[in-house]
Amino acid sequence: MLEHQWIMSDKPDDDDPESSVLVQTRPKTKRPPLYKVLLLNDDYTPMEFVVHVLERFFSMTHAQAFEIMLTVHKKGVAVVGVFSHEIAETKVGQVMDFARRHQHPLQCTMEREE
Ligand code: TYC
């Protein structure tokens, strides 16, 4: 993205450092990156537990949660939400902690969006 532009004087002089100036052409308001939260499949975590996790931490309806759980079960992984870095980290932590407390190997990770 072009955020600066060289403005030359009428009579450019390569030897004179003040014959051109760097000015800002528009304010730099870069949006902070977003992060995908991914849920991974495994062979041991019960389907109902995954559905409950999606309802509880990702505010999905039972039908939405069931559908996403099945996608993870069949494909191995699915994006369950897209958040700021801080919120994504919190969600991952909540899921991992909840799974560990219930002794399920469920894995949840985050990945920066392009
Ligand atoms: N594969 C698990 C089973 O058959 C269910 C499952 C779905 C586990 C999604 C993890 O993220 C997951 N019990």
Image (cartoon, grey):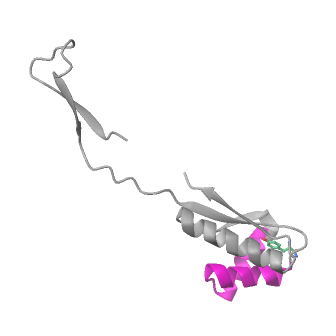
Residue 68 colored magenta? yes
Where 53 falls versus 114 (above or below)? below
Q: Quadrant of ligand 1?
A: bottom right
**Residue at left 90%, top 69%?**
43
Residue 14 relative to residue 30: left or right: left
Q: Quadrant of residue 21?
A: top left
Residue 64 visible here:
no
Give percent across and percent down for residue 7.
Answer: 18, 30
Where 50 falls versus 43 (above or below)? below
Q: Nearer the viewer, residue 103 or 77?
A: 103
Give percent across and percent down for residue 2.
Answer: 33, 39
In this view, which residue lies farthest toward the top? Answer: 15
**Residue at left 50%, top 56%?**
33
Residue 45 relative to residue 81: left or right: right
Q: Quadrant of residue 62?
A: bottom right
Give percent across and percent down for residue 14.
Answer: 21, 13
Number of numbered discs: 0
Residue 26 relative to residue 74: left or right: left
Where 99 falls versus 82 (above or below)? below
In this view, which residue lies farthest toward the bottom? Answer: 62
Residue 87 relative to residue 64: left or right: left
Q: Nearer the viewer, residue 110 or 48?
A: 110
Residues in magenta?
46-72
Give percent across and percent down for residue 26.
Answer: 25, 47
What secondary structure is the magenta-colored segment mainly?
A: helix
**Residue at left 64%, top 72%?**
91
Where 52 falls versus 71 (above or below)? below
Quadrant of the image containing the N terminus: top left
Q: Quadrant of residue 80?
A: bottom right
